[in-house]
Image: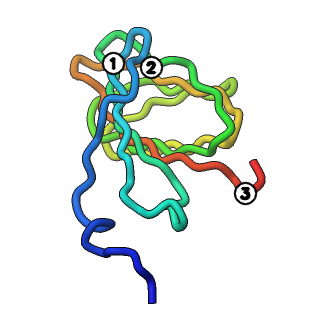
Amino acid sequence: MSSTNLTTTSGPVEFEHWYDFSEGGPVHRALLPFPAESPAPFEIARWSVAPGTANDLDVHRSREVWIIVSGVGTLTWADQTTVLQAGDLAAFESRVPHQVRNDGPEPLHAVSVYWLQPGD
């Protein structure tokens, strides 16, 4: 039987300030409460981009999924662009440059889920 206390690894999770985009806004990450010997296979962050600004151009080893919670913006990835709005998802393969510029009058809010592939 596992010695993990299920009451300490279940329930609401707090976000903490992680860093700020150079112009867009703050990034907060959730530190998931699972034990080190059995961690979650992903990490989570939430972030915002102020109107008329963009998040930092991002390129990293992890795969990533964005969930747009509110706002509207132009997504650029690799050599493509499209408009994202509340309810949209965007997925990025490892090492694909990606960025969103907030084209709307309100802050763009998003949640990111990201993970490394096995062996990466």
Task: Look at the numbered discs 2 and 1 and tell me whether their residues touch, using CB distance below 8 Å.
Answer: yes
Badge 2 is on which residue? 55
Q: CA distance from mark 1 to mark 3?
A: 31 Å
Structural crowding at the residue carrying mark 1, measured as other residues with C-alpha within 10 Å and reported as few (<14), some (14–19) or many (≥20) = many
Badge 1 is on which residue? 25
Q: Name the residue type under label 1.
A: Gly
- Give whichever of discs 1 and 3 has the lower sequence position: 1
Apparent side of residue 22 relative to residue 91 in the rendered image (left or right): left
> In the displayed image of the protein, which residue is found farthest to the bottom?
1
Give percent across and percent down for residue 50.
Answer: 29, 16
* Residue 84, label in figure: none
Q: Residue at x 33, y 46 (%)?
A: 87
- Give whichever of discs 3 and 2 has the lower sequence position: 2
Q: Name the residue type under label 3.
A: Pro
Structural crowding at the residue carrying mark 2, measured as other residues with C-alpha within 10 Å and reported as few (<14), some (14–19) or many (≥20) = many
- In this view, 83 is above or below 101: below
> Quick one: quadrant of the N terminus?
bottom left
Badge 3 is on which residue? 118
Q: CA distance from mark 2 to mark 1?
A: 7 Å
- Give whichever of discs 2 and 1 has the lower sequence position: 1
- In this view, 65 is above or below 95: below
Nearest the viewer among 116 and 78 is: 116
Q: Residue at x 61, y 28 (%)?
A: 77
Secondary structure of the residue carrying numbered label 1: loop
- In this view, 26 is above or below 30: above
> In the displayed image of the protein, which residue is found farthest to the front?
3
Give percent across and percent down for residue 4.
Answer: 39, 75
> In the displayed image of the protein, which residue is found farthest to the right?
119
Give percent across and percent down for residue 94.
Answer: 69, 40
